Amino acid sequence: MKKIILLVLAVALSFSSCEKDDICDANTPTTPRLVIGFYDFLNPSVLKNVSNLKVVGEGMTTGILFNGAETTSGSMISIPLKTVGTTTTYSFTLNSGNSNPALVDEDIIRFDYSTQELFVSRACGYKTIFTLDPTNPYTHTDATAANVKWIKFISVEKNNIENENETHIKIFF
């Protein structure tokens, strides 16, 4: 009788250590990117396509070229924010790669925010949501000495960046 109880106990213990395989579903929301829409400065309700816009993160040597050889044209982009720290800086270069250097214009935008980690699931782990600083969400400067900014105005539409279903920032040019 003792042998049967020990055998049942051993089998029960061997099954109790197993757990199901968790796989994070591709449709599970993860850390959202900052969604930026580009608008016509003279007609603010109209989305405007960018012309050879190159976006490069601070400290990076290569970036993403919109409306050029690397991607298709568009009036909306999504860029990641750093999950470690409270600022992310990007260089936005209009007419990147143009043979006439006078037409190439670079503006630099630093985004200031706070982060919060949320547990998604055992399989997916954590995601980070961002809240843009309500008093100073960004700093906009020009990279050249001429200080002529191609970006005329920046509007923060949503301070809380929790998903990629809506525009967070509007850039008018």
Image (cartoon, rainbow, N blue to C red):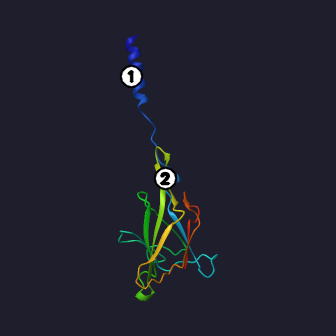
Left or right: 160 as drawn, with respect to 106 = right
Give residue 118's position: percent from left, percent from top: 50, 49
Residue at mark 2: 116
- Which quadrant of the structure image shows residue 41? bottom right
**Residue 123 vs residue 92, the one in the foreground:** 92
Query: Residue placed at 43% from the left, 68% from the top?
Result: 89
Q: Earlier in the sequence, mark 1 or mark 2?
A: 1
Position of 106 relative to 32 (above/below): below
Give residue 119's position: percent from left, percent from top: 49, 47
Give residue 94's position: percent from left, percent from top: 47, 80
Position of 36 relative to 23 (above/below): below
Amino acid at circle 2: Gln
Dot 2 crowding, Cα within 10 Å, few <14, some 14–19, many 20+ = few
Q: How many marks?
A: 2
Label 2 near label 1: C-beta < 8 Å? no
Residue at mark 1: 10
Position of 138 relative to 146 (above/below): above
